[in-house]
Image (cartoon, rainbow, N blue to C red):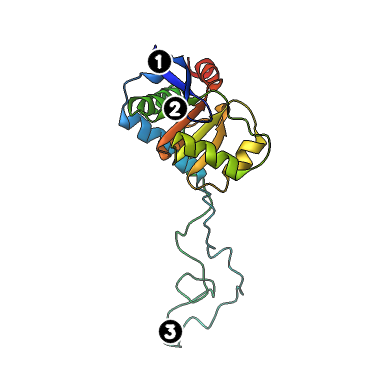
Amino acid sequence: MAAVDVLNSAGEKVSETQLPDEIFSVPVKTSVLHEVVRSQLASRREGTAASKTRSMVKGSTKKLFRQKGTGNARAGSVKSPLRKGGGVIFGPSPRSFAFKVPKKVKRLALRMALSSKHEDKNLFVIDNLTLDEIKTKMLASVLGAMQLNDLLIVSDAQDTNLELSSRNIPDVKVIKTAGLNVYDILKYKNLLLVESTIQNIKGRLG
């Protein structure tokens, strides 16, 4: 197991904790991370673009003019895609862009993402990060003391004060252990774990 320093809100080392090797020391394969991130982003796409085919366009079904003798093409419908205001040929229709990735691959990618942060020395652990009130300035002072920005904070439980205090700080996001995902880990440069979340992560991925 790898040892990592546990800091307090003043940025001072107060103890050490062990990170399990099977989660935080896994060889990183970019192809696996890429596949899982693509899956996450694809599932977020709404896929609501839509156009009307000739059967959906409102209009008369009467033949526009007689078949012969006018010198025009033999038009039969005002809703034809060839006419202004007509339907669209092969236009987009609502669909899902999501594609599935095996659960084992998702879990492996999550381990790899955590391992990459530890390998790059961008993973930090804090003993406690509980705020008495919703105060952005208070959280900003803690992060300033720890010299952290572009940061993903992982908490072990729902903490409304922490979440609301972080919303006005650029490039800072707070998520629970249950919501930990590959995209957010890779999106932010630094990762800050509350010490109690390590056991939860171990229980989920170990």
> Residue 72, percent across and down?
43, 84
Is tag 3's residue or tag 2's residue first in the polypeptide sequence?
A: 3
Spatial separation of the CA atoms under disc 1 and disc 2: 11 Å
- Horizontal side, residue 39 vs residue 163: left or right: left
Confirm whether residue 99 shows in the render: no
Residue beneath label 3, please? 72
Above or below, 197 relative to 95: above
Marks 3, 1: nearer the viewer: 1
Q: Amino acid at mark 1?
A: Ala
Residue for badge 1: 3
Look at mark 2 in the image and give the residue it sits on: 124
Element assignment for label 3? loop
Q: Which quarter of the picture shows residue 175?
A: top right
Find the residue positioned furthest to the top.
1
Question: Which of the two discs, 3 and 1, labels the residue nearer the N terminus?
Answer: 1
Q: Quadrant of the N terminus?
A: top left
Q: Earlier in the sequence, mark 1 or mark 2?
A: 1
Residue visible at 54% across and 80% down in the picture: 64
What's the residue at 65%, 33% (across, down)?
Answer: 159
Between 8 and 175, the one lying in front of the other is 8
Instruction: State the image quarter where residue 148 is shown.
Output: top left
Give whichever of 119, 71 is nearer the camera. Answer: 119
The 10 Å Cα crowd at callout 2, few under 14, some 14 to 19, many 20 or more, is many
